[in-house]
Image (cartoon, rainbow, N blue to C red):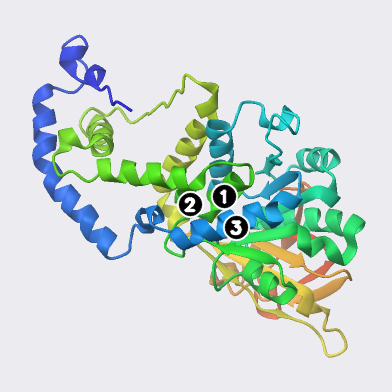
Amino acid sequence: MRLAYGRMLSDGLDGEHGLPRGRLTELTHRFAEVHAEVRDRRARGEYGFYELVDQPTTLREIGQFAEGLGQAHDHVLVLGIGGSALGAKALLNALRPPAWNELDDEARDFFPRLTVLDNIDPGSVAAALRRIDPRRVLVNVVSKSGGTAETMAQYLVVRAWLEETLGPAAVRHLVFTTDPARGGLRELAEREGIASVTVPPAVGGRFSVLSPVGLLPAALVGVDIEGLIAGARTALERADPTELLHNPPALYAALQWAADTWLGAGIQVLMPNTDRLRELAEWYRRLLAAVDQDRVRAGQWRLLEIEGWRDNQSCRNLLAWLWSGEEGVDGHLVVINLSGQPAQGRVRLDWPRLEGRSWQLVDPVQDVSFDRDGTETSTGLFVDLGAWQFHLLAIRPSSGLA
């Protein structure tokens, strides 16, 4: 792979636009300091994705799973959002023949088809489930936190669909990709004996394509994941030189930084000229968007307490999470009933910004909203959910909420 950057320099254009070649020399002088900082941060564990080129145990375990249980199915259904879905789609499109799902079994070398659901659109979900035989599908639920709102909503729908045909055997058609120790999916996996693989805690979602997030679906459809990681290791070696002009990834980053900072040209367009790299462009766009959103990185998901009543302890079947960001940013509430019976409880929001103020709960899935006042932050928000049902609610100002 070559990096052709001549058209970013003014002498490759009209002499007026673009980066003066002399400033490229300035970038080379500044790079030593930047390179040293990156190495220091990597040594402190801030860039966990670097370590994904050295994971022989994970590769072996995923390979064994794909050759064993994975080959007992003729369709893989991935449930995820953002980086948890885009990586698998990019790998499938880039490394498997075009129109993979339309090929017959022999043309696919008898590897399964792969469908990725990266949205909670009921129409898309229902259409996908109509095409898939629940007796022959392996469902891979991907959420590093174990509580991503959209993914958990997908999971509830798909699990109910599996159980309608398979009953208790539905758990044998599930595999979770999640945190090794925490979160709702990890708790479910341990409680119900569901197969699982782990996402390294130091690897963020948009950087996780070469972790089990992307490697498991890739291996299931026959991608050589050891070769994939070997290629990543080679790419990492090419990013190691301290001389900027001999370090293509750093040179690309430096030129983009210079265009934005010195020239005010802050728009990047990644235009793949092959359809097989189309999903790579989309993954790259989402990756840049995630890196650029300080407020999202500063926010957090929190598991909430849910209380019941002496004569009604169905609240034990409920799980609830709250996402809260910086001041002035809407929050999100997710409540899930993980049982086959109705469940009620009071969810303690524990969010001081709501106290004594009016606010709205907006359901983007069903396009309905509910007005509430601040008293329910202390007494708890009453919820009543049917079997396997959920609430996905945005918390928005009604009046006077900062």
What SS does tag 1 mark? Answer: helix
In depth, the one of 226 and 179 nearer the eye is 226
Please determine whether, in this image, residue 203 is positioned above or below residue 78. Answer: below
Q: Quickly name the residue at label 1.
A: 84
Residue for point 13% across, 22% down: 20
Q: Quickly name the residue at label 3.
A: 64
Residue type, label 1: Ser
In depth, the one of 337 and 360 nearer the eye is 337
Residue for point 72% across, 53% down: 139
10 Å crowding of disc 3: few (<14), some (14-19), many (20+): few
Whether pointer 1 and pointer 2 mark residues with C-beta atoms closer than 8 Å, the reply is yes
Residue 308, percent from left and from top: 78, 83
Number of the front mark, 2 or 3: 3
- Quarter the N terminus occupies: top left
What SS does tag 3 mark? Answer: helix
Q: Earlier in the sequence, mark 1 or mark 2?
A: 1
Q: Is residue 273 visible?
A: yes
Residue 168, percent from left and from top: 86, 67
Q: Quickly name the residue at label 2.
A: 208
